[in-house]
C-alpha cells in the first residue's frame, strides 16, 4: 500500500498562452459597406421614438374627441353653477333699513359641563361633546330655529369661560348626584 506517490507526473500544457498572429486591417478598404458608429436614431431607437410620437398623437386626438362628445351630451361630471338669489332680512324689498338683532337668552340648562381634564391639551365635555380651548360649541336655543356658537376661551379647575365674540360667559362643572339604590 502506497500513500504518497514517489514520482510526480510530468507537467502538461493544456492551452497555449502565446498570442496568435493577426492581420492588420487597412484603413482604406475596397468594400462599399463601411460601418459607422451607432447613432441615436439608428436601429430600434428610431422605432421607439416613432412609436412614442404616434401614441402621444392618438391620446391627444382621443381626448379631444371625448371632451367634445361629453360637452355635446351635457355630461354632469364637470362643475355645475347654479344661479341663486339672496333675500334681505330688511323690512321690505328696496329697503335700506338694517334688520332687528336676534336676541337669545342664555340659560343655565343650555350649557351642561360634565367633565374637565386639565392635561395638555385641556379638554372639557360640554353637552356630551368633547372640546378643547379655542374650539366652538353650538347651542340650540329653545323655541327658536337659531343656533348660538360659543368659543371656549379657557378651561380651568371647575369652570369654563366661553365667548360669543362680544361677551364672556362662565359655566361651572356640574357633578350629577349618585343614583339612589332601589329598595325592594
Image: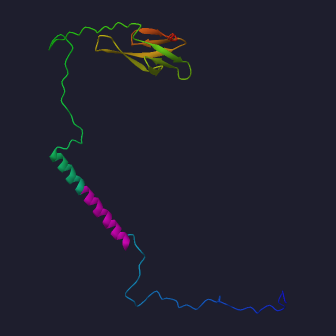
Give the image quarter of residue 105.
top left
Query: What is the total number of numbered labels drawn onto the structure image?
Result: 0
132 or 124: nearer the eye?
124
Membership of 55 in magenta stretch: yes
Question: Above or below — where is 37 with respect to 137?
Answer: below
Q: Is residue 82 visible?
A: yes
Q: Is residue 119 left or right of residue 144?
A: right
Taking the magenta stretch, the answer to whether it contains residue 52 is yes
Q: Give the overall secondary structure of the magenta segment.
A: helix
What residue sits 40% from the left and 18% below the top? 137
Relative side of 14 to 122, left or right: right
Residue 51 x/y as whole percent: 31, 66
Is 138 on the left or on the right of 2, as rendered? Answer: left
Quarter of the image for residue 85 reads top left
Image position, residue 102 (x, y; %): 29, 9
Residue sitting at x 37%, y 69%: 45
Residue 32 appears at what percent x and percent y? 37, 87
Residue 158: % across, % down: 53, 11
Of 159 and 9, which appears nearest the observer?
A: 159
Point 29% across, 12% down: residue: 144
Tell me which residue sits at (18%, 29%) in the image: 83
Placement of the N terminus among the 4 image quadrants: bottom right
Q: Check the image and tell me how it is coloured.
A: rainbow
Q: Which residues are magenta?
A: 42-60
* Vertical relation: 24 (above or below) 36: below
Q: Is residue 42 among what the camera can see?
A: no
Near-viewer residue (36 or 139): 139
Kindly indicate the quadrant of the structure image that contains residue 57: bottom left
Amino acid at each position: 500500500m502506497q500513500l504518497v506517490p514517489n514520482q510526480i507526473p510530468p507537467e502538461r500544457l493544456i492551452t497555449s498562452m502565446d498570442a496568435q498572429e493577426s492581420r492588420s486591417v487597412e484603413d482604406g478598404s475596397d468594400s462599399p459597406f463601411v460601418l459607422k458608429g451607432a447613432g441615436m436614431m439608428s436601429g430600434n431607437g428610431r422605432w421607439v421614438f416613432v412609436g412614442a410620437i404616434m401614441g402621444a398623437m392618438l391620446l391627444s386626438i382621443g381626448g379631444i374627441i371625448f371632451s367634445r362628445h361629453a360637452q355635446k351630451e351635457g355630461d354632469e361630471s364637470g362643475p355645475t353653477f347654479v344661479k341663486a338669489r339672496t333675500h334681505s332680512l330688511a323690512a321690505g324689498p328696496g329697503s335700506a333699513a338694517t334688520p332687528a338683532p336676534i336676541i337669545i337668552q342664555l340659560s343655565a340648562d343650555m350649557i351642561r359641563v360634565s367633565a374637565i381634564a386639565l392635561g395638555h391639551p385641556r379638554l372639557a365635555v360640554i353637552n356630551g361633546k368633547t372640546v378643547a380651548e379655542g374650539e366652538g360649541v353650538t347651542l340650540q336655543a329653545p323655541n327658536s330655529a337659531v343656533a348660538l356658537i360659543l368659543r371656549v376661551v379657557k378651561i380651568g379647575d371647575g369652570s369654563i369661560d366661553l365667548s360669543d365674540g362680544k361677551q364672556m360667559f362662565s359655566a361651572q362643572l356640574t357633578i350629577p348626584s349618585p343614583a339612589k339604590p332601589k329598595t325592594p
